[in-house]
């Protein structure tokens, strides 16, 4: 009787241990795969933004100020990894598209948030939409320029 | 629903521009200094009074029903005696001077007072970057906020439309400073909204 009880106990414990090990293995593999996936490739993102400014601002100067704000906050290494650049800027409507790496979304938003001056103009950047391709971002900008989206 | 609890227009003409920009940014309610009564429109505007704290609260409040009452601490030593303010004001505003000189013992007093603490973004941002001295004090506050010991409200203190900040950018800044996304969103939406509800219920 004792032997049978012991056998059942060992069977149950070993089964539970096996299930636990399997779960840990599965989770570890999933985590490793996620790390490999995200770490392997940095996808580009394009953010359409609107600039509210007290004076007319050029794209070059705006890019310089956003980059220097990003550098002040997060340093040169992150600035290089974020691959920040302004791809398009309409001076008349003050609408533009900024390109960055997908892992740096919050950092880029923070840098845009602290950018308050460009040259001697007071500015405020309003993020409107984020897309995965420049073509789609420009399509949104064109719609805004025509006046479809407001 | 985003709420900005502190707007101080430099002049009367700036107020209209600030309100229209705030509406575009997605704010649904704001508290404005210098308003006489609550205004409803596209954007809910609540009048606000800020008192300078000089060791004790003012005695009468009859005239200020329907107003958001805030006390501003000018010196770090003011934090020592805050228990008298409990039930007398809606928020406790911390100036950049207090944040720059914040010590651990003062932080503990802030925890015990039980009043939501208001920090202005204008104090945190300096020359297209963050103000290092203010940030040092602010970082001492963050663990308490994260634990839920202190309730933090972030406001813009905007004087013109360029000093407003987009809620998404504000959340991003707070997140990069070390707060969790949930608490960052709470600091600009549900918590200030609760304060405004207290104002309209005349609590």
Image (cartoon, rainbow, N blue to C red):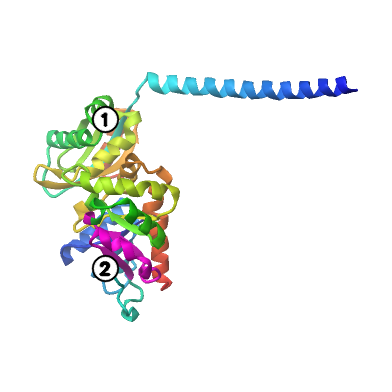
- Tell me the SS state at disc 1: strand
Q: Residues within 10 Å of mark 2 (few under 14, many from 20)?
A: many
Q: Does the magenta stretch include residue A21?
A: no
**In terms of image quadrants, where is residue B31?**
bottom left
Residue B163: give x, y in percent of width and height.
Answer: 21, 53
Specify start and end residues of the magenta stretch as a single range: B68-97
Q: How crowded is mark 1: few (under 14 residues within 10 Å), some or many (20 or more)?
A: many
Tell me which chain the residue with mark 1 is part of. A
Q: Report the disc number at residue B53.
A: 2
Residue A4: give x, y in percent of width and height.
Answer: 87, 21
Residue A109: give x, y in percent of width and height.
Answer: 29, 39
Tell me which chain the residue with mark 2 is part of. B
Give the residue drawn at x 31%, y 73%: B57
| Vertical comparison of B63 with B95: above or below | below
Share a chain, discs 1 and 2?
Answer: no
Instruction: Give the quadrant of the N terminus of chain A.
Output: top right
Along the line of sight, the residue nearer the viewer: A10 or A32? A10
Query: Would residue A5 be found to the left or right of residue B43 on screen?
Result: right
Give the residue drawn at x 30%, y 72%: B56
Evaluate whether residue B131 shows in this view.
no
Residue A99: give x, y in percent of width and height.
Answer: 26, 30
Q: Does the magenta stretch include residue B95?
A: yes
Query: Would residue A28 be found to the left or right of residue A6 on screen?
Result: left
Query: In this figure, what is the number of numbered marks?
Result: 2
| Tag 1 residue | A99
Distance of mark 1 from mark 2, alpha carbons? 47 Å
**In terms of image quadrants, where is residue B23?**
bottom left
Evaluate whether residue B101 shows in this view.
yes
């Amino acid at each position: 009787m004792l032997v049978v009880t012991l056998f059942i106990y060992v069977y149950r414990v070993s089964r539970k241990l096996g299930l636990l090990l399997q779960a840990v293995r599965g989770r570890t593999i999933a985590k490793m795969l996620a790390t490999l996936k995200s770490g392997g490739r940095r996808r580009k993102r394009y953010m359409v933004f609107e600039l509210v400014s007290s004076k007319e601002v050029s794209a070059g100067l705006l890019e310089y100020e956003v980059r220097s704000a990003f550098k002040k906050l997060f340093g040169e290494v992150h600035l290089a990894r974020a691959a920040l650049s302004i791809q398009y800027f309409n001076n008349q409507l003050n609408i533009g598209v900024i390109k960055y790496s997908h892992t740096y979304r919050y950092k880029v938003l923070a840098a845009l948030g602290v950018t308050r001056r460009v040259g001697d103009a007071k500015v405020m950047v309003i993020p409107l939409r984020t897309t995965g391709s420049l073509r789609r971002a420009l399509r949104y900008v064109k719609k805004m320029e025509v006046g479809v989206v407001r | 629903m985003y709420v900005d609890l502190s707007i101080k227009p430099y002049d009367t003409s700036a107020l209209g521009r600030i309100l229209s920009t705030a509406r575009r940014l997605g704010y649904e309610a704001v508290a404005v200094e210098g308003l006489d009564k609550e205004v409803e429109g596209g954007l809910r505007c609540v009048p606000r009074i800020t008192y300078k704290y000089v060791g004790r609260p003012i005695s009468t409040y009859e005239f200020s029903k329907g107003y958001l009452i805030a006390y501003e601490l000018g010196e770090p030593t003011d934090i020592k005696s805050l228990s008298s303010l409990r039930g007398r004001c809606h928020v406790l505003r911390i100036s950049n001077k207090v944040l720059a000189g914040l010590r651990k013992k003062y932080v503990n007093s802030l925890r015990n007072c039980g009043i939501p603490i208001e920090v202005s973004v204008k104090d945190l941002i300096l020359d297209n970057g963050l103000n290092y001295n203010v940030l040092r004090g602010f970082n001492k506050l963050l663990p308490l906020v994260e634990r839920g010991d202190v309730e933090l409200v972030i406001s813009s203190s905007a004087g013109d439309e360029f000093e407003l900040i987009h809620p998404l950018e504000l959340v991003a800044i707070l997140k990069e400073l070390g707060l969790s996304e949930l608490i960052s969103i709470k600091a600009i939406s549900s918590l200030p909204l609760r304060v405004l509800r207290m104002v309209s219920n005349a609590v």
